[in-house]
């Protein structure tokens, strides 16, 4: 079962894990099978023995990140959006980069900012067109 470490007493090595089934399981230092010590918030995999967690291993970072779903984004559409509506950051919103899209939108409200975002959008459009389809799909996955 998978879960997350809720707490650990460093002196005794005892702790508690919240399982993906919603139950809480206790463990001792002897139940921990990983070379690194348990840490609060760590994602773990473990065996259940009643209300006790046994053979606990820390999951690798990103082990439970879901795979991208849906059709990949279209790099030609992203480049066209960057060329024609780029100063507004529309292409950034399309690619899921809302933070930089908001920055571009706010910068466009000033004359100097509009010049900066214009160059920024043009560089983005050229970059998208020169990028391979595989790299584009990896860099901008649909989630």
Image (spheres, rainbow, N blue to C red):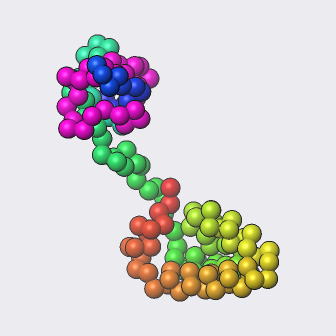
Residue sitting farthest toward the front: 11
Q: Is residue 24 above or below residue 129?
A: above
What residue is shown at x 42% (from left), y 76% (from top)?
133
Magenta segment = 13-42
The quarter of the picture where residue 22 lies is: top left
The picture quadrant where one finds residue 25 is top left
**For residue 90: magenta?**
no
Can residue 17 be seen here? no
Q: From the image, which quarter does the N terminus lie in?
A: top left
Q: Position of residue 96 (x, y in %)?
A: 57, 62
Position of residue 113 measured from the top left corner of the image (x, y, whole percent): 73, 79
Q: Is residue 39 visible?
A: yes
Point out the residue furthest to the top here. Answer: 50
Q: Residue at x 38, y 73 (%)?
A: 134
Instruction: Tell whether 115 sits left or right of 44.
Output: right
User: Which secondary structure dominates the residues rendered in magenta?
Assistant: loop
Rendered location of residue 143, percent (x, y): 50, 55
In the image, taking residue 58 as reference, residue 105 lies left or right, namely right
Q: Position of residue 4 (x, y in %)?
A: 39, 32
């Amino acid at each position: 079962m998978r879960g997350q470490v809720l707490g650990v007493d460093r002196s005794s090595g005892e702790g508690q894990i919240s399982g993906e089934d919603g139950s809480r399981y206790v463990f001792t230092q002897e139940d921990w099978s990983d070379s690194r010590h348990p840490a609060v918030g760590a994602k773990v995999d473990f065996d259940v023995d009643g209300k006790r967690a046994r053979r606990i291993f820390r999951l690798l970072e990103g082990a439970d990140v879901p795979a991208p779903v849906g059709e990949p984004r279209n790099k030609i559409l992203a480049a066209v959006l960057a060329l024609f509506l780029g100063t507004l950051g529309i292409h950034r919103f399309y690619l899921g980069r809302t933070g930089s899209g908001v920055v571009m939108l706010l910068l466009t409200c000033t004359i100097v900012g509009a010049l900066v975002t214009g160059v920024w959008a043009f560089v983005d459009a050229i970059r998208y067109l020169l990028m391979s389809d595989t790299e584009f799909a990896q860099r901008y996955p649909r989630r």
